[in-house]
Amino acid sequence: MRQIFLDTETTGLSADNGDRLVEIGLIEMVDRRLTGETRHWYLNPERSSHPDALRVHGLTDQFLSDKPLFAAVADDLIGFVSGAELVIHNASFDLGFLDAELARLDRPPLKQVAEGVRDTLLMAREMFPGKSNSLDALCKRLEVDNSSRTLHGALLDAGLLAEVYIRLTRGQDSLVIDGSEGEGGTREIAAIDFSSFLLPVLRASEDELTAHEGVLKELDKASNGKTVWRQTVA
């Protein structure tokens, strides 16, 4: 399964009112493994960022003035996401901006190009109802290291989102870049010899055994001698 983790930064909060994209970050994952394929663009939005947005992403007018327009990266963007599932945190926000940019070029919405869209904000709200489910909050809750995140950045946030997604879906604890492949394109995974591991055995002390027996006797008394483990031993 091919997935693209996507994040954007913008000049403000409303694409309908003319706010534009200033940054796009994309990270590819295939079968729950990062491939190392990414796309990252800073864009000239042809307008200034709202002060609140500027405080979030820190991308000044001067920095963006010589960056490409969205039209220059549109074909690469569409080709990269084609046929993949998009994974986005608060998907309606990012897709609203991307689709507005595509509409200016008479191009179809991104949903018509991608295989589908998965919104991790909706996933998190189902799993953690009533709690903060921002990307920062999820990183903290799921123990994803975001210590390098002082300002929001699209590629950085797409990478954090990939880690958060893996932990939300309980597939594995961290991400791995694809390694060598065997014949036919199958991945070679080194076998682990578990016989080389020495597992410590912690035995209960006399006091712990006595306390445990006391609990069992209380259960015997409460059940009138019908505890299943006593009957099994007998």
Image (cartoon, grey):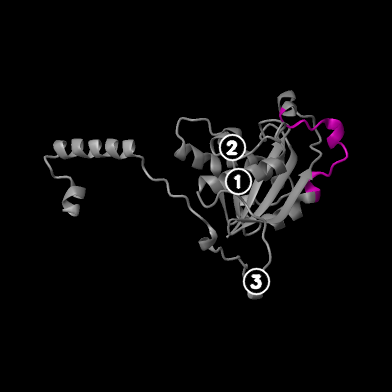
- On the image, the x and y values in percent for residue 55 come to 73, 26
Q: Earlier in the sequence, mark 3 or mark 1?
A: 1
Q: Residues within 10 Å of mark 1 (few under 14, many from 20)?
A: many
Q: CA distance from mark 3 to mark 1?
A: 25 Å
Is 228 on the left or on the right of 123, as rendered? left
Q: Is residue 198 visible?
A: yes
Q: Is residue 101 visible?
A: no
- On the image, the x and y values in percent for residue 137 come to 57, 33
Locate residue 70: give its quadrant: top right
Task: Tell me the residue that label 1 is attached to.
Answer: 163
Q: Is residue 65 magenta?
A: yes
* Helix, strand or loop under label 3: helix
**Which residues are the magenta region?**
56-72
* Helix, strand or loop under label 2: helix
The amino acid marked with disc number 3 is Gly
Task: Tell me the residue that label 3 is attached to.
Answer: 185
Task: Tell me the residue that label 2 is attached to.
Answer: 139
